[in-house]
Image: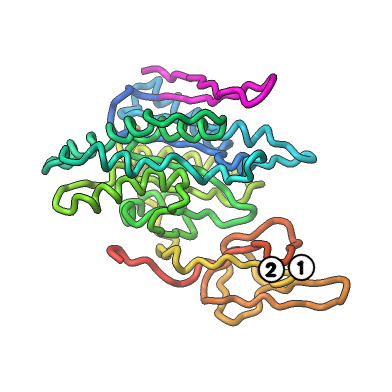
């Protein structure tokens, strides 16, 4: 199939508003493996949008040459609502300004609906079970009656991706190392992704009950497998969040190699024909998300760091100070664990109780743990 572009209109939220998603499709509908990629769910996180622009060029060339052997769906900007939320020249795309709800929370929770629909319908054929769960997911989603624009957006994104074998949600932090978030039922399967993109931090979790986009996929497969322990129910989707460094890291010298890495990953997984080359070496060991520490300001003031992103910090080490220019007091920020300083806010002022950086603690994930 030649590259097809689809426009999906969202319901108008008010007088004179009209927003839409653009969906790019490659390969043959229904072909396997199917890959789904989107970017900009937190709308101000721009690097993934640029990465997918580069990737679209490569996929269009591959599709024209008949090299897309599976099916690929790409949504280059997944949150046009958030992109329109400009306040004083800054995009406020992380939260819905109507409800203060995070755009990457509250995706349709299909677990109960799927469990009801697959009860008594699964057997000893793993492939048939995967197909049955995907059908149940589609039916459970269709049974919903979402009307608000943000909820329709989330349901639409989930509907485009719920039958995919590979689901990649591209994000970025304020300032960060390139890192990967994946759930335990997809690890170590996602090791090739981590190595291909050059992830400097890998965090393995158990799925988020706040129902992020990733967890909307993960939790269904985990719940079905848990409810049918004597039947083969493999994860039907390898769902992961790829955090593409910081929000300002949009330049071609970074984003073009990122797009190449994703293209080679799709080749490695058999979605696109061709040889991806040697798998790059592992850059880190996977860490458990239980060892993640988000640091919050004990007081207000200017953040003065003594360590850079990617530096190791030791438990008890003062790696930053919060400077109060009124009193000239410097409040030490002490590392609670041994680990890696891997993400921080780009603004160097913090309010009391405000999140400003994150440390990936040295609690390493072991498969089966």
Q: Which residue is mark 2?
A: 297
In the figure, is residue 31 to the left or right of 337? left
Q: Quadrant of residue 267?
A: top left
Residue drawn at x 63%, y 42% as measured from the top left? 99
- Label 2 secondary element: loop
Which mark, by number, is residue 300? 1
Taking the magenta stretch, the answer to whether it contains residue 254 is no
- In the rendered image, residue 358, in percent from the top left (x then y), is placed at 58, 64
How far across and how far down the image is residue 158, in percent? 42, 35
Query: Quick one: quadrant of the C terminus?
Result: bottom left
Coordinates of residue 202 in the picture (x, y in percent) = 44, 59
Mark 2 touching mark 1, by CB under 8 A? yes
**Location of residue 273 with respect to 315 vertically, above or below:** above
CA distance for labels 2 and 1: 6 Å
- Residue at 35% across, 49% down: 219
Instruction: Please report the bounds of the magenta region as a residue range.
Output: 1-25
Quarter where residue 85 is shown: top right
**Quarter of the figure that contains the N terminus:** top left
Q: Residues within 10 Å of mark 2 (few under 14, many from 20)?
A: some
- Residue farthest to the right, as pictured: 326
- Disc 1 is placed on an element classified as loop
Q: Residues within 10 Å of mark 1 (few under 14, many from 20)?
A: some
Q: Is residue 356 above or below residue 130?
A: below
Identity of the residue furthest to the bottom in this view: 316
Q: What scheme was used to colour the molecule?
A: rainbow
Nearer-the-camera pick, 56 or 360: 360
Residue 112 left/right relative to 347: left
């Amino acid at each position: 199939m030649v590259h097809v572009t689809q426009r999906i209109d969202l319901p108008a939220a008010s007088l004179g508003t009209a927003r839409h998603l653009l969906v790019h499709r490659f390969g043959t509908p229904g072909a396997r493996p199917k890959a789904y990629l989107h970017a900009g769910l937190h709308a101000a996180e721009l690097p993934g949008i640029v990465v997918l622009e580069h990737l679209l060029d490569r996929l269009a060339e591959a599709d024209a040459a008949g090299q897309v052997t599976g099916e690929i769906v790409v949504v280059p900007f997944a949150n046009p609502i958030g992109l329109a939320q400009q306040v004083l020249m800054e995009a406020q795309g992380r939260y819905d300004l109507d409800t203060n709800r995070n755009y990457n929370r509250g995706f349709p929770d299909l677990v109960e609906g799927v469990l009801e629909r697959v009860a008594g319908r699964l057997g000893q054929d793993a492939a048939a079970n995967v197909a049955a769960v995907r059908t149940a997911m589609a039916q459970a989603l269709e049974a919903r009656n979402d009307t608000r624009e943000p909820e329709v957006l989330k349901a639409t994104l989930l509907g485009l991706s719920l039958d995919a074998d590979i689901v990649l949600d591209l994000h970025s932090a304020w300032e960060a190392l390139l890192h990967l978030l994946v759930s335990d039922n997809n690890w170590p399967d996602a090791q090739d992704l981590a190595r291909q993109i050059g992830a400097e931090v890998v965090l393995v979790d158990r799925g988020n009950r706040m129902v992020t986009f990733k967890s909307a996929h993960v939790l269904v497969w985990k719940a079905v497998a848990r409810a049918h322990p004597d039947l083969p129910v493999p994860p039907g989707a390898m769902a992961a969040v790829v955090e593409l460094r910081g929000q300002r890291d949009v330049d071609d010298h970074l984003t073009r190699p990122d797009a190449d890495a994703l293209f080679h990953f799709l080749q490695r997984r058999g979605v696109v024909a061709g040889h991806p080359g040697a798998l790059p070496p592992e850059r880190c060991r996977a860490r458990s998300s239980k060892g993640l520490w988000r640091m919050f300001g004990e007081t207000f003031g200017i953040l003065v760091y003594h360590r850079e992103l990617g530096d190791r910090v030791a438990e008890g080490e003062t790696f930053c100070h919060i400077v109060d220019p009124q009193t000239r007091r410097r409040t030490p920020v002490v590392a609670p664990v041994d680990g890696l300083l891997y993400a921080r806010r780009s603004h160097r002022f913090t309010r009391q109780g405000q999140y400003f950086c994150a440390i990936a603690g040295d609690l390493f994930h072991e498969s089966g743990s």
